Amino acid sequence: MIPVAVAHLKRCAILLLLIVWWPRLEAATPPAAAIATAHPLATEAGHEILAAGGNAFDAAVAITAALAVVEPTGSGLGGGGFWLLHRARDRHEVMIDGRERAPLAARRDIYLDDKGEVIPRLSVDGPLAAAIPGTPAAMAHLARRYGRLPLSKTLAPAIRLAREGFAVGESYRRMAQFRRDALRGSPEGARLFLHENDVPPAGHILKQPELATTLEAIARRGAAGFYDGPVAARLIDGVRAAGGIWTKEDLARYRIVERKPIRGRYRGLRITAASPPSSGGVALVTMLNILAGYDLAKFDAATRNHLIIEAMRRAYRDRAIYLGDPDHVTVPARKLTHPLYADGLRAAIRPDQATPSKLLPGGATLETGDDTTHFSVLDREGNRVAATMSINFPFGSGFVAPGTGVLLNDEMDDFSAKPGAPNVYGLVGGNANAIAPGKRPLSSMTPTFLENDHGVAILGTPGGSRIITMVLLATLDAASGAEPASWVGLKRFHHQFLPDVVQHEPGTFDAAQAEALARLGHTLKEVNDPYGNMQAVLWDRKSGKVLAASDPRGEGKAEVR
Ligand code: DON
């Protein structure tokens, strides 16, 4: 009797141990932290905060703020973004939607003349192009809800960089050349970001004391430091004096939203990505669902890429028709990410022929762009952040409200100004993405986690509508076992339904493949502009290695420490 009881007790004890230890086995932590961002000083700021006892979320605050200072072409306090989080302790995953919102005085036809025609540049240059920023609110929320350190600590590196200055790089100078006229349209924008009204010389030290003061206000008062008080007053006065329509109420009513990320699966990989108002996660999962029906490795390169292009075409058609701000329109995200829906789309793909986009039912979209910014963070506890942030066009709207140092976005251009009328990138869209007061413009930003039993990847990139297809190509590469250096360096191609062309980087397709794709009915178009700036981290649980990579096309830095 007694031995039986002992044996039983032993079994119970083992079971109990397993129950207690199981979550710990699952939550084994990485041997090092890793950060990949578009600027070495932002990567350094993130590591500085980790070394000071902060977690990945604190580092994300520091990086967001540092990028606002050292990469003003791509993101900033005057813009917005999506911060995808994974908290290791309880595996909590959420997307912080800090996307800009249309001002309350914005109307559907705000960019149209009396004849109903789009007024060129109005949604791109100057304060009327600017939506209400979300980045300051997102930083404050990240710090309060997920961080460990006060904003006074996490914003310190950015404040220092803004006060002491930094040397502008080649990409800054290229973008300043590209947006020189928009900056010249704003006396404060020109004073801060140009030098003697022109592109600053190489090595120019950019100091931003007003931005430092604005950051200090946020460090002291959290979001209220930006959306209320003297900074808010200066923003409103500056915008209105230059013909903009912001009101106090716009700033006072700005709220971030915590949203459930989009989820999907591809050949054993679990995908977690940005949800609407980004189109990224939905389109990514649709494409992967379509492609999951093929054994891509079995095809020759031309056929494989043909199938990928056809998947892109279909997902972007749906983007144009269905996607918009879920707080304003019904977005059928569940349907679009359902494997059965993808089965239907795949059934209509011919392996031997391209489907002309005009033969597919539906709307039209086209967008491109190569600014914006992405960073990826993994800390030693296993917390993760994938964040893509934007002010849209390089240097946003070019407009700076005097006394704030804050370059305002031109994210209003991500709305469709009129159904069927192309935006600055040639983008057209429909009702789902029409302008409405307080609405968030549709985005392509796709911060993403990939996960399987082997490991965890954190990735994303800027690049307008090409963001989603870049993340797709990286995901396919990751699924085939490649490492981050390969994902970020891959030659890229893209199809977005309309125009019905395959954009690609030079050297993506060799002559034989280009000919094969043309024979299938694809029109190839080589693009020479900088194409993306991907930042990726991989924690390989099996080998215990942490790897990070920064896109060779950019000036960023990935560092494992
Ligand atoms: O949210 C979006 O999709 C765009 N505002 C991103 C723009 C971008 O990546 C680069 N544009 N030049």
Image (tube, rainbow, N blue to C red):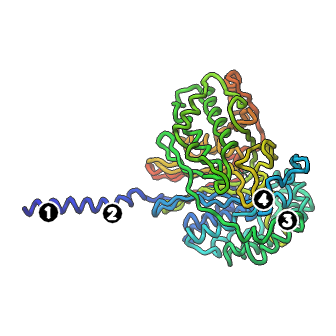
The residue at which mark 2 appears reads as: 20
Label placed on residue 6: 1
Q: How many marks on residues?
A: 4
Q: From what the image shows, is residue 149 above or below residue 479?
A: below
The residue at which mark 3 appears reads as: 192
Left or right: where 26 falls relative to 53: left
Q: Residues within 10 Å of mark 3 (few under 14, many from 20)?
A: many
Q: Residues within 10 Å of mark 2 (few under 14, many from 20)?
A: few
Q: Residue type at mark 3? A: Leu
Residue 511 shows in this picture: no
Q: From what the image shows, is residue 89 above or below residue 350?
A: below
Contact (Cβ within 8 Å) of mark 1 with mark 3:
no
Label placed on residue 549: none
Contact (Cβ within 8 Å) of mark 3 with mark 4:
no
x and y, in percent, of residue 224 in the image: 70, 75
Rounded to the nearest angstrom, the CA distance separating label 1 from label 2 is 21 Å
Rounded to the nearest angstrom, the CA distance separating label 1 from label 4 is 70 Å
Q: Residues within 10 Å of mark 4 (few under 14, many from 20)?
A: many
Q: Is mark 1 within 8 Å of ligand 1?
A: no
Q: Residue type at mark 2? A: Val
x and y, in percent, of residue 83 in the image: 62, 59
Q: Which residue is at a point 66% across and 74% down the rendered structure image? A: 222
Q: Which secondary structure lies at badge 2?
A: helix
